[in-house]
Image (tube, grey):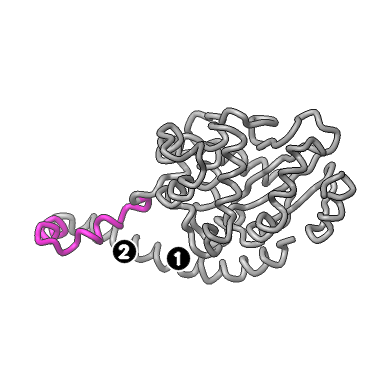
């Protein structure tokens, strides 16, 4: 369980927030200078002196605006499940037992969990032992800043629209030791990086519809809806695993899976 990780992230976040405030102050100063001395900036721009500064005065720059994403029309991926389509379901929806896994795509403890037990948990669901419900949050975006948790969830939505199997394979790859970045590196905010990882999934490689959905942020609002649902679940840290609604320590999960017939 990553409660300790969450605490460490909060401490690190204070330093991050201080740096962000300083960065914002510099942006505000540049913006004021641009308003007061616009003609001067234009002259300098001709000389090539401030092109970089002007380009970076826009808060969004080339990055997507998640505030705008919230106002978009909700597009649910095919194969999504649950209320408002905010659950990724693996296995038979009518299975008697349910395992819920709450994760953050930037979370290193979640990456460790997936590398150690992810395939086993998924296989148990595929074999009909229980249904697996995956929920994605954005705790680390909030603690460290950045958009990688949200953006990866959106890209996974695009994969889910292709198939549950494509989602499952892509989800595992993003958490793999090869592709999962440190939590303070916001690589998942970069669509090019997400698409590069997706090249290792047969169903997603050279899939133009999938690529367009990632680049256009087709499932951005869906990702935000899923994150809202995650937040309503009362999760304190990631990964959180619940069997039939009851929290289970990750360290005891192999034994619990054995009870459910998973070897």
97 is higher (above) or lower (below) than 15: above
Query: Residue 81: where, in percent of width, then height?
Result: 67, 31
230 is higher (above) or lower (below) than 182: above
Q: Quadrant of residue 132?
A: top right
Q: Which residue is mark 1?
A: 21
Residue 232: mark: none
Q: Nearer the viewer, residue 249 or 13?
A: 249
Task: State the residue at coordinates (32%, 52%).
Answer: 58
Query: Residue 94: where, in percent of width, then height?
Result: 80, 28
In magenta, the rendered stretch is 40-60
Q: Is mark 2 in CB contact (under 8 Å) with mark 1?
A: no
Count of all numbered marks drawn on residues in the image: 2
Task: State the residue at coordinates (13%, 55%).
Answer: 42
Foreground tag (2 vs 1) = 1
Residue 29: mark: 2
The N terminus, quarter of image: bottom right
Residue that lies at the very extreme toward the right in this rendered image: 259
Q: Quadrant of residue 131?
A: top right
Query: Residue 217: where, in percent of width, then height?
Result: 45, 38
Crowding at mark 2 (Cα within 10 Å: few <14, some 14-19, many 20+)? few
Crowding at mark 1 (Cα within 10 Å: few <14, some 14-19, many 20+)? few
Name the side, left or right, on which 20 lies relative to 97.
left
Task: State the residue at coordinates (81%, 58%).
Answer: 249
Give the spatial CA distance, label 2 vs label 1. Answer: 12 Å
Task: State the residue at coordinates (79%, 35%).
Answer: 128
Q: Which is nearer the N-term, disc 2 or disc 1?
A: 1
Name the side, left or right, on which 197 lies relative to 51.
right
SS for tag 2? Answer: helix
Query: Residue 4: where, in percent of width, then height?
Result: 71, 67
């Amino acid at each position: 369980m990553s409660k300790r990780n969450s605490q460490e992230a909060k401490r690190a976040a204070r330093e991050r927030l201080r740096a962000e405030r300083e960065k914002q102050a510099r942006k505000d100063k540049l913006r004021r200078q641009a308003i007061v001395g616009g003609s001067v900036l234009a002259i300098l721009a001709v000389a090539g002196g401030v092109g970089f500064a002007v380009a970076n005065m826009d808060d969004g720059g080339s990055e997507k605006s998640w505030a705008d994403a919230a106002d978009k029309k909700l597009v649910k991926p095919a194969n999504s499940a649950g209320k408002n389509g905010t659950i990724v379901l693996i296995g038979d929806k009518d299975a008697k037992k349910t395992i819920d896994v709450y994760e953050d795509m930037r979370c290193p403890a979640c990456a460790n969990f997936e590398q150690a037990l992810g395939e086993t948990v998924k296989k148990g669901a595929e074999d009909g032992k229980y249904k697996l419900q995956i929920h994605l949050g954005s705790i680390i975006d909030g603690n460290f800043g950045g958009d990688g948790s949200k953006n990866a969830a959106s890209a996974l939505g695009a994969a889910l629209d292709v198939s549950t199997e494509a989602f499952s394979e892509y989800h595992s790859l993003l958490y793999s030791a090869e592709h999962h970045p440190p939590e303070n590196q916001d690589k998942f905010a970069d669509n090019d990086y997400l698409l590069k990882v997706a090249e290792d999934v047969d169903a997603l490689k050279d899939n133009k519809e999938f690529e367009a959905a990632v680049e256009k942020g087709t499932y951005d609002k869906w990702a935000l809806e899923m994150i809202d649902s995650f937040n309503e679940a009362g999760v304190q840290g990631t990964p959180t695993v619940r069997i039939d609604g009851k929290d289970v320590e990750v360290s005891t999960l192999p034994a619990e899976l054995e009870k459910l017939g998973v070897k």
